[in-house]
Every structure is written in structure tokens, then in C-alpha cells.
Amino acid sequence: MQQIDSILNKVREFPTLASFFSALSGTIANPNANIHDVAEVIERDQASVTKLLKIANSSIYGFRSRISNVSQAILFIGFEEVRNILLTLKVIQLFRTRDSDIKLINPIDFWKHSIGTGVIARSIGMNIGIQNTDILFLSGIVHNIGKLLFYIAAPDDYENALELHRTQKINIQDAEREILGISNSSIGEMLAQKWKLPLPIIEAIKYYPTGFVGEKINLNVAIIHISDIAALILGYGNDGREYVQEPNPNAWELLHLPDNFFSLNYPRIQRDFEENSTILLDD
């Protein structure tokens, strides 16, 4: 399995998250840290400040008064939510520096699928009463990072996997294992562990194709499972798949969503998708 060894080497060689994010996480974890301490770390990265304020002032949060500085953003949004927003920005930025390496798919289309998944996941979370929906949004953003790594590290073999998926109409994960010896969810999990992402996000990356963690349905994973499929159906971007698998009925039942959930929430989902895509993919 020489190809697996090559891909695993790519994971080991792939850059870690910026020291900025490590410093931010450490400061937030410090029980003695206050808003100004966290803001001081964020303000060292002006690009992150600019996008954070754009997001804070967007209709996504809908604050009545304008948020003009990082301290206000933290006060209104919260420590963990701000951290998740900035992690989202850093992950996208890290991969987008490799856009020129991706030949099989338009990178913007790929990220739009991920953003669509995140937006739908957050909408579902809000509907069923989950408080920290930003971690669902981040999970949606990164659920496909293993697939993106395949596009970068093994384009020829991944093209063969996509062709097998299309012609034989088999699940993309099965096609990946057939051609590359490993699935995108497994390789994505390895990269997420290298980055020391929170466990709920690692689980979402590893288990989103089925909605199961082991033999049990997991709420966050079920949300990402349904959101990934819904994003494909709604035409939000493109991650290379040509047909949509049937959702796990147990995952759908766990969410207790009304049958008309998507028709009722489509206008907000569409608005949030367009706004997030503009902010997150604007160079």
C-alpha cells in the first residue's frame, strides 16, 4: 500500500495551525483571562480582526448595534464562539494557499459545499435547541478536509476513485478505499488530530458519512450527516460527488425535525449561505 504511505506522509508534512491560534486557545483556557486579554491576542492578526468584525456585523448574528472592535465581538458572541469563527478562518486560509495544487475541482465550489453544510448544520442546531451552534458550523466547514487532501496529495488516483464512484454508482468512501486504500473521513480524522481540534469536530469528520459513532447515533454527527446530504441536494457548491446517497433514517429521526423543515427555513439558509460564502471566500 505504497499510496497510503505517500498520503500519510502528506498528512505529517501538512502545516500545523498558526501559532496565533495556539496562543488564542491557551488564553481562552486560562481561567484568569478576561475579554481584553483575548482581544489582545486576536488583534495581533489584522486579517482575522477584519473578517471577525464582518461576521459579527452580518445578519448571521443580527445584533441591533454595530460591533466596532474585537472586545465587543467577544462580549456579544462569546469566547468559544469567537474561537470557532477564527479557527474556521484559519482552516480555510491554510488550504486556500494550496488552491493552485487542486486541478480536479474548482476550490471555490468545494468550499461552498463545506460552507453550505456548516450553514445547514447551524440552522438545524438552532431549531432543536443546541446552544453552541458555531461548533456545528465549524464541523460542517471541515467535514471534507480529507477529500481536499486527496485532491492535493493524490490527484490521479483520486480521479480514478471519482470515476469508479460515477460509473459504478458506489459510495464515494467505498471508491476511495478501493483505489487509495483509505477513506477521506479516516484521513481527515488524522489531520484533525494533528491540529488538536476538539473531539466533537474530530468525530464529525470521521463519522459524518453514516451518522453513527461506533454503533450509536451521535447528535452532532447526525446533524453533519444530514447537512452534508442537504447541501448537495440544494446545489451548494460541489465536492466531486455526482449522486446523493440516502440519509441514515436513524439520524433523521434523532433530530425530530418537521417534515417541512427545509422549505420553512430555506430563505434564511440561503441568505446565510450567500453571506458566509462572500465573507469567508473573499481574498
Image (cartoon, helix red, strand yellow):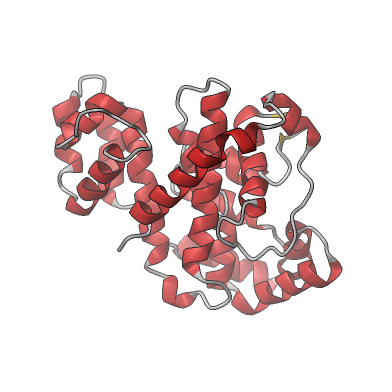
Report x, y in % for residue 156: 64, 79
- Residue 198: image location, x then y, percent: 47, 36
Frontmost residue, 63 versus 35:
63
Task: Classify the position of the N terminus by image quarter.
Answer: bottom right
What residue lies at 73% left-to-right and 42% top-to-bottom?
A: 210
Total count of labels:
0
Question: In the shown orientation, is residue 105 left or right of residue 253?
Answer: left
In the visual, does 115 lie left or right of 4?
left
Say if 33 sits above or below 226 in the image: above
Q: Quadrant of residue 21?
A: top left
Q: Residue at x 58, y 48 (%)?
A: 189
Q: Please indicate, yes or no, whether residue 142 appears anywhere in the rendered image.
A: no
> Which residue is farthest right?
168
Q: Residue at x 75, y 60 (%)?
A: 243
Q: Measured along the vertical axis of the image, is residue 85 above or below residue 142?
A: above
- In this rendering, the answer to whether 282 lies above or below 135 is below
Measured as percent of width and height from the top left, residue 211 is found at 70, 38
Q: Position of residue 222 (x, y in %)?
A: 66, 34
Residue 158 occupies quadrant: bottom right
- Determine the residue positioned at 23% across, 32% down: 73
For the question of whether residue 151 can be seen, the reply is yes
Image quadrant holding the C terminus, namely bottom left
Tell me if 204 is positioned left or right of 56 in this view: right
